[in-house]
Amino acid sequence: MPTVALLILRLLFVLVAAGLGAGFMNSAILPSEPAWIPWLVFAACLLASGGIIALDVVIRRKRLETMTAVYFGLLVGVLLTYVVRLALTPLLPDVNNPLNQKAQQIVYWVLLGVGTVLCYT
């Protein structure tokens, strides 16, 4: 039986995934027609979070060294994402210009993708 803290952590993870899905739904990158595509992306985010939690439940005994390495790798990935963002800033379009709303959305999602890849790596 999982502890209360673990249940709360898993619930927070699902809520973050739901927030990410809602962010995708409201972004200008996804096509608005047909109307079910944003909902499909939202459901995919929730399904992915459920799959990760299921994988966590299946793997019973996790080694402390492995978990520490994963968290340390995530911290290094976040730091590298920040450094890459600083390095790419001169190459990216001006996101402060209100006329560049589409460019703002694209830059945001590109940086999110770069961060995801770096954290995974």
Image (cartoon, grey):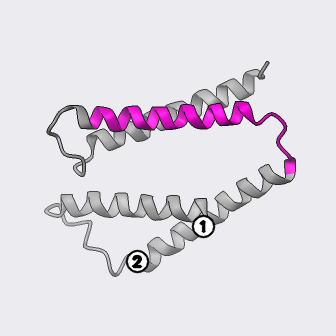
Q: What amino acid does circle 2 point to?
A: Leu
Pick the quarter of the image with the C terminus. bottom right
How far across and how far down the image is residue 51, in percent? 57, 34
Q: Residue furthest top?
A: 1
Q: Cα distance, mark 2 to mark 1? A: 14 Å
Q: Residue at x 27, y 41 (%)?
A: 26
Left-right relation of 100 to 39: left
Residue 24 position by quadrant: top left
What segment carries the magenta color? 38-64
The image quarter containing residue 107 is bottom left
Q: Nearer the viewer, residue 49 or 90?
A: 49
SS for dot 1: helix
Secondary structure of the residue carrying numbered label 2: helix
Q: Is residue 18 above or below residue 89?
A: above
Q: Is residue 94 left or right of residue 20?
A: left
Q: Which mark is residue 79?
A: 1
Residue 38: x and y, percent?
A: 27, 37
Q: Type of residue at label 1? A: Leu
Task: State the mark number for residue 88.
Answer: 2
User: Quick check: 56 above or below 93?
Assistant: above
Task: Count residues near mark 2 (Cα–Cα under 10 Å), then give few for <14, some for 14-19, many for 20+.
Answer: few
Q: Residue 73 at x, y = what percent? A: 69, 61
The residue lying toward the viewer, choosing from 48 and 97, is: 48
Rendered residue at 72%/28% (across/down): 6
Label 1: how many Cα within 10 Å (few below 14, some 14–19, many 20+): some
- The residue depicted at 25 percent of the width and 72 percent of the height is 94
On the rendered structure, is 58 left or right of 109? right
Give x and y (percent) for residue 79.
60, 67
Q: Give whichever of discs 2 and 1 has the lower sequence position.
A: 1
